[in-house]
């Protein structure tokens, strides 16, 4: 466990104090992590209708779960491979768990593949995620999902001083913990993202590893519901 250290930066001149309003977009998440009863594969009651009620707004082009259960592995992985950043092996591992009775069971199988992996594999999995407003964005190399999510949070339109601050925080976080800062940006305002990154910087790497995986639970569930109908 890494001992806490005082954080300071010449680039980020403010204290990045918690904003009084607008830190979190959803009432179901406190402190940036899902609530304690947010079991892998479940959907907490506190979430807004935008994600929880996606069926009312999404196109019927989503694949039905019963059709997904009957797919060959190649097509299954091609469809779900992007749910986790640069990690189609997760979908491949979940394929063996078919058939799935509901979307929650599918999601739990996918997260189970991650959580049952070796420590080295989990670390590589975390490192496959992009930094927020980082090099991948600047080079136009974000995945389609990440590009849309980060743009929606306003991270593609940062002021120069915000960009420098975020990159400084990103670099310090990665140097400290060995993987990029990961957050479900759909659940935060821009100010909330800055606050969470600075708040989580001095936590232990073990805590951050757990929190990163919790955030990936939320990210992947939203992405999965955009692809598959629970029927």
Image (cartoon, rainbow, N blue to C red):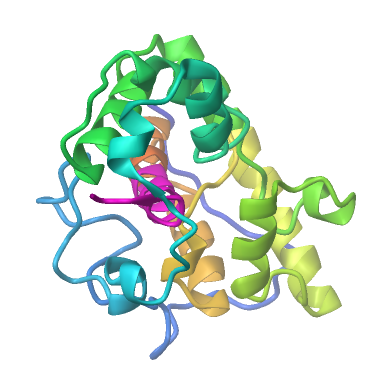
Which residue is rendered at x = 45% and y = 54% of the image? 62
Residue 167 image offset from top left, x and y in percent = 75, 56
Q: Is 38 positioned to the left or the right of 145 in the image?
A: left
Look at 42% across and 42% down and name the residue there. 212
The x and y percentages for residue 14 are 63, 78
Residue toward you, 36 or 6: 36
Q: In the visual, does 168 lie left or right of 179?
A: right
Is 211 positioned to the left or the right of 145 in the image? Answer: left
Judge whether residue 226 is colored magenta.
Answer: yes
Residue at position x 27%, y 27% in the image: 109
**Magenta stretch prevailing secondary structure:** helix
Picture quarter containing residue 58?
bottom left
Residue 192 image point, x, y percent: 48, 73
Instruction: Answer whether residue 206 is magenta in the image.
Output: no
Chain part drawn in magenta: 215-231
Q: Where 165 sits versus 169, above or below? A: below
**Position of 215 relative to 61 (above/below):** above
């Amino acid at each position: 466990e890494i001992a806490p250290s005082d954080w300071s930066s010449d680039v980020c001149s403010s204290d990045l104090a918690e904003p009084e309003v607008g830190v979190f977009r959803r009432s179901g998440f406190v402190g940036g992590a899902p609530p304690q009863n947010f079991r892998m594969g479940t959907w907490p009651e506190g979430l807004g209708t935008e994600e929880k009620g996606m069926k009312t707004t999404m196109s019927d082009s989503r694949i039905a779960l019963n059709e997904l259960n009957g797919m060959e592995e190649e097509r299954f992985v091609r469809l779900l491979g992007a749910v986790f950043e640069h990690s189609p092996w997760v979908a491949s591992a979940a394929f063996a768990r078919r058939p799935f009775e509901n979307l929650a069971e599918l999601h739990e199988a996918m997260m189970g593949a991650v959580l049952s992996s070796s420590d080295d594999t989990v670390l590589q999995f975390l490192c496959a995620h992009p930094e927020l407003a980082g090099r991948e964005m600047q080079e136009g190399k974000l995945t389609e999902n990440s590009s849309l999510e980060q743009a929606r949070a306003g991270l593609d339109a940062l002021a120069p001083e915000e960009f420098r601050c975020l990159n400084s925080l990103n670099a310090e976080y990665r140097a400290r913990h060995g993987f990029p800062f990961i957050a479900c940006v759909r659940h935060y305002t821009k100010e909330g993202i800055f606050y969470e990154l600075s708040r989580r910087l001095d936590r232990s790497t073990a805590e951050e590893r757990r929190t990163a995986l919790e955030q990936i639970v939320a990210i992947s569930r939203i992405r999965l519901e955009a692809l598959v109908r629970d029927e």
